[in-house]
Amino acid sequence: MSGKVISNDINKDKGKLENSFSVEADDIIHDERIQNDSKPREDGVFWINPNPKTVSEKIMAYAKLCMLALPWIGVQCIWAAEFGTTTPYLEAMGLSKGWASNIWLAGPLTGFFVAPIVGSLSDKCHLTLGRRRPYMIAGLLLLAVVSTTLACSRYFGSAGLPVAITMFVMMDGTINVIQTPLRALIADFAPLEQQATGQLMASTFQGVGGLLGYALQKYLWKDPLSILVLFMVVLAINAVFIGGTCILVKEEHFAANQDDKEASIIEPFVHLAKSIKHLTGKLMIVGACVFFCWWALFSWWPTSSTWYMTIVMKGCCEDPSEAGYNGQCTSETYGYCLQGQDINANANILANVAQICIGLTFALLMNRGILVRVRFVWSALLVFGSVILIGSKFIKGSWFAYLVGIGMAVPISGINAFPFAIVGSYNQVATNTDDLEGAAVENEDMKKKEELEVGSQFGLLNLFIVVPQIIATVVIGQLRDNFGDEGLSWAIFAAGISFGIAAVVALFIRENSKLA
């Protein structure tokens, strides 16, 4: 998920996203085996024209980039379905409110381990299908088994809750099996000058997937325990987009040779540990900002659906019409729960539309060199997020709840784009000898080869994303154990404070003169 959510990140320089730190930049961009040839391959390997001249050539290049990015619609759709439904589902299955929050530790923990392992193994894959497609197909098959079992766990009697918890944890891992090699596809095939465009398309399709996922929730998820139809439709969407890309995008087969190192699952972690000593002041500031951003995000995403149903609408989410029910819910309070569920779906649909528009606008401004100094804009977006989340503790009513849900698109759009653009700009300066000679580099480590590796830097940045997710999950679990559902209000209030801290830190980020 992590996952999840999760959600939508552009690296303009090498086309890498935050969790894919296992796929090093040198392996992707500078590997002589990556095919960015000036003419189509005779063996049918997928190819994108690096220098399209005519309108038809440009359209074809964009269409092929879209083909690489299309699976993100399915991936983000399953993340949206998981974020919106699993907390109410597990609570309805009998899981305590505290543990329903603590279980979201599965996302960052499985992402931290699965993503680098899969990335490292796919880099050295010698199967006929290529390097990335075998893992995407395997992940899709695993997702089919895990999501179906999770959705059907309510019928397993006394074993239902343990099965649901197990499948929930495994689902986060299987999604990472898909999205880790998927992130590498654009970097593998897109010419260097089209990397930013390709990642922009991936980010856009993530927004489309989130929009689709929440729209399906609105129409297919009518009861906390009724997730089977929703999950099956989302699985079919993933099969169409992932399967279609795997069929149409032919990878080159890299035969094993004696010089190739044997794939190791610990290699990415060793590389990450060695990179920590090269962490510069610049990256520390960006990392601190990202840390508080993700604390806020992971205080909102897993809890928002329950917040709408139990705090905003003051509903009770146990169906009193079920045979043998002996709880405290009434038909009226259960109706309030369903109204909150509907508000959550509507707000998320509108938020994803807003996120697509905002993200595309900022990316376009950055690509054209109009938006250069982004730290002030990023800080302003975070301030807006801080205000609406803090306000949710004091301003009641469904109208403000709508504003909060839709308004979260504003800070999320900045978080998905700006930190990766800034770190990418550091590497653009560091890898250019002339720029290095003229730049005021305070830390001499910037000149070291290890520092110049984008993969190392994004591995470090990933720590600032995973760690706050774990902390936020533990804190929310304790709040719910001690304060019940009211603990969600305090968790979201704390998320607003975290956004405020991130907004202040963002003002101290040191930017290069050019981000494009």
Image: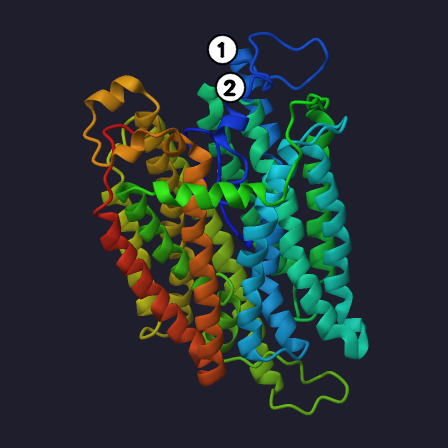
- In this view, the residue in front, 455 or 321, is 455
User: Which image quarter is the N terminus in?
Assistant: bottom right
Quick check: 52 above or below 197? above
Query: Quadrant of the rendered structure where residue 433 is?
Result: top left
Residue 442 horizontal side relative to residue 166, left or right: left
Q: To which residue does mark 2 refer?
A: 191
Is there any visible trace of residue 356 in the rendered image? no
Q: Secondary structure at mark 2?
A: loop
Marks 1 and 2, how far apart at CA:
9 Å
Is there any visible trace of residue 202 in the rendered image? yes
**Colouring mode (rainbow / by chain / secondary structure / one colour):** rainbow
| Spot occupied by residue 321 in the image (x, y as percentages of width and height) | 71, 84
- In this view, the residue in front, 8 or 162, is 162
Q: Tell me whether circle 1 and circle 2 mark residues in contact (CB < 8 Å).
A: yes
- Badge 1 density bin: few <14, some 14–19, many ≥20, Cα 10 Å: some
- Badge 2 density bin: few <14, some 14–19, many ≥20, Cα 10 Å: many
x 71%, y 88%: residue: 325
Amino acid type, residue under disc 2 in the picture: Pro
Q: To which residue does mark 1 refer?
A: 51
**On residue 461, which mark appears?**
none
Q: Secondary structure at mark 1?
A: loop
Quick check: 321 above or below 445? below
Query: Quadrant of the rendered structure where residue 510 is?
Result: top left
User: Which image quarter is the C terminus in?
Assistant: top left
| Spot occupied by residue 214 in the image (x, y as percentages of width and height) | 57, 55
> Going from the N terminus, do you reach mark 1 or mark 2 first?
1
Amino acid type, residue under disc 1 in the picture: Asn
| Spot occupied by residue 282 in the image (x, y as percentages of width and height) | 27, 41
x 32%, y 59%: residue: 499
x 44%, y 84%: residue: 483
Of badges 1 and 2, nearer the viewer stands: 2
- Furthest toward the front, the residue is 258
